[in-house]
Amino acid sequence: MSERVAFLGLGIMGSRMAANVAGAGFDLIVWNRTQSTAERFCETHQAALAHTPQDAAADAEFVITMVVDGPQVEQVLLGENGAARAARPGTLFIDCSTIGPAATHEIADQLAKRDLALLDAPVTGSSPKAQDGTLTIMVGGPEAGFHRARPLFDAMGELIVYAGPSGQGQMVKLLNNAVAASNASVLAQALVVGKRAGVDLDALVSVMGAGAGGSTMLDLKAGPMRTHDYTTLFKDVRSDSGEVTQEIQPFFKLEHMLKDVRLCLEEGQALGVPFPAAALTREILSASTGRGHADHDFSAMIDVIEAAADTRLTE
């Protein structure tokens, strides 16, 4: 494929997504805030290196962002040396970050003034599915843009859903994550109650998994919660000398999940709709950051439940 894609943000998710874009044959140019990360990516993938987002977007038909939050997306696209400064009219911007509908609308409006369109296309599936190219991608924005970008989405994901106008991809993502985090919170509470009651936790997890209590969160988080292993992903890191070591990283940082739940509650508040389960989950996640777990996988929320009950799953 001859279409040039600028990929901005090569973190845990972005690096894997960009690798699949390169593997699909797109002409890829990458930028990352830490330049050495982008340099290492280019050493192992068919991609060019850009020193600024503006440089990356200069000749691109598509510009994909995968960063942490709304302010970062705004800076990367609209700030000094931002991608929008060099993008040609008609360039399609695709934001795969999770930033909420309000920030999406604001950024889309600013881009539209330059004859640039934005799709909000947050993803779910965590790093293993990013690695395999089997993410779920929910897309908001102009439907014509969605169809134009479909080959890119197919390179990165398995379930591709058009959610509606601008911001709707973000809203679907926030609701999904709020439900997932609340599910994990309930799981943590059940495990601690079971431990205090003297239940065989292997038996409890087996029964829940086979019945109505089963869930993706049970499959993914019961183990880390029981072992207190909140950093279970390994990433290859190449030193300046060429030596490759493994760096431990979380599947989904707790502080990022807290951000998503907070954004969901803000949208609900603006609509006048309560979401009490998510509100409780936000407080548990917030307390978890206070206990030093911001950079850990969000399964670390078990620590707050254990502390409240004065009960540990493992001695």
Image (cartoon, rainbow, N blue to C red):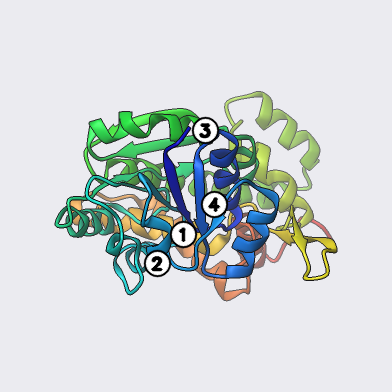
Residue underneath mark 1:
67
Contact? badges 4 and 1 (CB < 8 Å):
yes
Where, by quadrant of the figure, is residue 105 drawn? Answer: bottom left
Query: Which of marks 4 and 2 precedes in the sequence?
Result: 4
The residue type indicated by label 2 comes to Gln
Query: Mark 3 against mark 1, which lies toward the viewer?
Result: 3
Contact? badges 1 and 2 (CB < 8 Å):
yes
Q: In 3D space, how far apart are the residues under numbered discs 3 and 1 (Cα atoms)?
A: 19 Å
- At a point 60% along the width and 44% down the height, the residue shown is 19
- At a point 42% along the width and 38% down the height, the residue shown is 3
Q: In 3D space, how far apart are the residues under numbered discs 3 and 2 (Cα atoms)?
A: 25 Å
- At a point 31% along the width and 28% down the height, the residue shown is 147
Nearest the camera: 32 or 189? 32
Q: 11 above or below 130? A: below
Classify mark 4: helix, strand or loop.
helix
Q: Which mark is residue 72?
A: 2
The residue type indicated by label 1 comes to Val
Q: In 3D space, how far apart are the residues under numbered discs 4 and 1 (Cα atoms)?
A: 8 Å
Q: Is residue 227 visible?
A: yes
Name the quarter where the C terminus is drawn.
bottom right
Q: In 3D space, how far apart are the residues under numbered discs 2 and 4 (Cα atoms)?
A: 14 Å
Contact? badges 2 and 4 (CB < 8 Å):
no
The residue type indicated by label 3 comes to Ala
Q: Residues within 10 Å of mark 3 (few under 14, many from 20)?
A: many
**Residue 70 placement (x, y as % from top left):** 35, 63
Q: Is residue 8 left or right of residue 273?
A: right
The residue type indicated by label 4 comes to Gly
Residue underneath mark 4:
14
Contact? badges 3 and 2 (CB < 8 Å):
no
Query: Which of marks 1 and 4 precedes in the sequence?
Result: 4
Q: Which mark is residue 222?
A: none
Residue underneath mark 3:
155
